[in-house]
Image (spheres, rainbow, N blue to C red):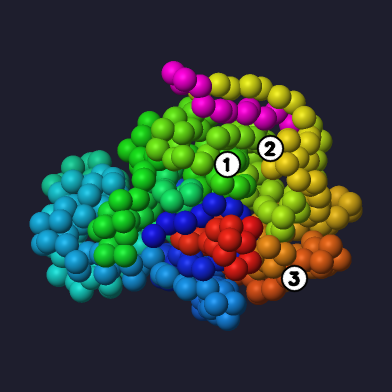
Amino acid sequence: MINVYSEIGKLKTVLLHRPGKELENLTPSVLDRLLFDDIPFLDVAQEEHDVFAKTLKDEGVEVLYLTDLVSEALDSVSEEARDAFIRQFIKESRIPNKSATDAIYSYLKKMETKPMIEKMVAGIKKTEIPEHFSGTIMEMLENEYPFYTDPMPNILFQRDPFSSIGSGVAINHMFTATRQRETLFSDFMLKNHPRFKDSDIPKYYSRDADHAIEGGDVLVLDSKTLAVGISMRTNPYAIENLARELFKQHETFETILAFNIPNTRAFMHLDTVFTQVDKGIFTVHSGVLSTMTIFEITKKEDDLNIEKTITTLDKILEKHLGIPIELISCGGKDVVDSEREQWNDGANTLALEPGKVIAYSRNHVTNRLLREKGITVLEIPSSELSRGRGGPRCMSMPIIRAQKGEHNES
């Protein structure tokens, strides 16, 4: 049920999350806490996301929605398992007012499954549940914060909580506590949904691991090569641990390339500066066109073999993919266009098949350059979606792509 051996093989099945009330629960005072730079207008964001989903469906892609799958998984398990899920969500919400946890449990338990999941994502306001205080000074101070459980606006970016790698998955440990709850949904879905639970899907990483890794830093270049960004969200130790499990459990992957990228908001994940659009063709931000430090990780008899190299992106890709590489600079050569369009995820495209991608319409310079290279670009609106700092690849998690030998192979 998981089959992703490249970034460009024909996309057959993808997982999305349609934005909901969690965006309306963003306020200026919680933006930093919840990792957003601005407050999107929900109605327009939903319209734009629906265009994204329709574009995928029109191309023959099966579109799955996270809240649907988690709801179906919950409905398929025992009452004890459902209760455990609710209690784990409450525990990971880190509610400082301990006297309120029972009330929140009762509030969620009485809901139908789908509305309950949507409420978990949207966030529970303190005004929705009668106050339960023991009367301490600390609890009175904490009452000034409007939420019992924080909204989860970043769940829009389904690329991050887990990663489809070959026939298995890495359930990621997120860099911030704000996003860690997202992986509770992914993990439960993959373990319990009828679509996945009997498939014996290999697991290469655990959400309970010690070190952070996020899916935006993971790119499947081919059946032998994985690229992972060392970024502000992904720890080098996590990459080594992922490598050990991947080499142990999977028969095809031979090399992991760990790219050291700048530790800044603009370079949040590897896929914000580097995505594949066709065989041997990538769109990149100009900031990674000079030499960079890359660690080549291969399997050794008793552990890992790691070699450090300083080279250019095209040379390292040519070495490991064995084909000529062409890099298309996001925004072109003009520094203003490049910086603007990279900020608006011009380098974050989603390949539907070799030579056909979905991209934000606002990045007109990058889209023109792609078309000049023969790439078909399907544009989607993004005035509100782009406020979250994530593009089409960020918003999607491929579940199945065509393998070699199938139609539109990679």
Q: In the figure, 217 relative to 192: above or below?
A: above
- Location of residue 292 (image quadrant): top right
Q: Nearer the viewer, residue 212 or 108?
A: 212
Contact, mark 3 vs mark 2 (Cβ under 8 Å): no
The amino acid at mark 2 is: His
Residue 320 badge: 2
Q: Quadrant of residue 45?
A: bottom right
The magenta span reads: 292-303
Tell which of 205 and 232 is nearer to you: 205
In this rendering, the label closer to the viewer, 1 or 3? 1
Q: Is residue 384 visible?
A: yes
Q: Which is nearer the eye, 26 or 244? A: 244
User: Local crowd at mark 2 within 10 Å, few (<14), some, or many (≥20)?
Assistant: some
Cβ atoms at labels 1 and 2 below 8 Å apart: yes
Q: Nearer the viewer, mark 3 or mark 2?
A: 2
Which quarter shows the N terminus? bottom left
Q: Is residue 352 magenta?
A: no
Q: Main secondary structure of the magenta part?
A: strand
Q: Amino acid at mark 1?
A: Lys
| Residue at 68%, 54% in the rendered image | 276
Q: Amino acid at mark 3?
A: Thr
The residue that label 3 is drawn on is 376
